Amino acid sequence: MAPADSTRALRRDARENLEKLTAAAVKVFLAQGFCAPLEEVARAAGVSIGTLYNRFGTREALIDAVVPVIAADRTGRLAAQAQAQPDPWSRFRFYVTRLLELQAASPPVDDIMARRYPGSQELTNHCDDALAHAARFIEAAQADGSLRGDFRIADLTAMFLANSGILRAATTVEEDAWRRHLEFVLDGLHVHRAAV
């Protein structure tokens, strides 16, 4: 085989390994979250763990490669759906509820919302996008007096962390405990207007 042919074959192999690793990572991370053993990702891709580290170097680099596929602008779509709600409180409530539903249904979304891997720039970007949408709904709901004025974006981050803890305790609490907790929190945040 000529040197040029050999180089092309190596490049093709490297490209194929990259594609297999990325597809396997999406599948494994969707099932288990970003904490899944990288050996399992390599096994699912049919390559060695050395090949995985050779292609990506770190877990965070692999996460960066797959977060756009896993997240797929879900928060943008949720924000658009929330915007269609009839009033500022309904928009805020809808958006927060749907974010926590996503977190409950998807281990990697839980990792994103809880910022478990701060070394992953893509993960951080997606979490920041979610919070940026939320900030607009918070501001509007506070402006019309339906949301407590002292609620801050940091409090929403704390809600994500609390929800993550409830989800991880799923074997010791009721399956919908996170939803009950969310309802209590939302009720405490809602400013109920007195009947005229």
Image: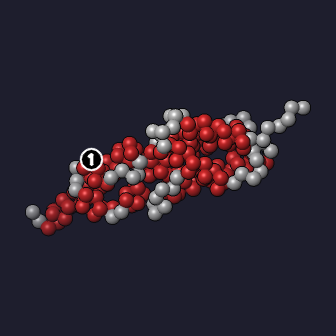
Residue 152 is left or right of residue 19, and the answer is: right
Q: Residue at horizontal 85%, vertical 35%?
A: 194
- Camera-side residue of 168 and 87: 168
Residue 40 is left or right of residue 124, and the answer is: left
Quick one: which residue is furthest to the bottom in this view? 3
Q: Secondary structure at mark 1?
A: helix
Q: Is residue 118 above or below residue 24?
A: below
Q: Is residue 85 visible?
A: yes
Q: Position of residue 13 (x, y in %)?
A: 22, 57
- Camera-side residue of 95 and 69: 95
* Mark 1 surroundings within 10 Å by alpha-carbon count, few (fewer than 14), some (14 through 19), many (20 or more): some
Q: Residue at horizontal 52%, vertical 47%?
A: 165
Q: Position of residue 74 (x, y in %)?
A: 52, 44
Figure quadrant of residue 6: bottom left
Q: Is residue 22 above or below residue 185?
A: below
Image quadrant in which the C terminus is located: top right
Residue 53 is left or right of residue 191, and the answer is: left
- Camera-side residue of 135 and 151: 151
Q: Is residue 133 visible?
A: no
Quick one: which residue is furthest to the left in this view? 1
Q: Is residue 33 above or below residue 12?
A: above
Quick one: which residue is furthest to the right in this view? 196
Amino acid type shown at disc 1: Ala
Q: Is residue 2 above or below residue 30?
A: below
**Which residue is disc 1 drawn over?**
44
Residue 61 is left or right of residue 169, and the answer is: left
Image quadrant in which the N terminus is located: bottom left
Q: Residue at horizontal 63%, vertical 50%?
A: 156
Q: Residue at horizontal 35%, vertical 46%?
A: 28
- Camera-side residue of 58 and 13: 58
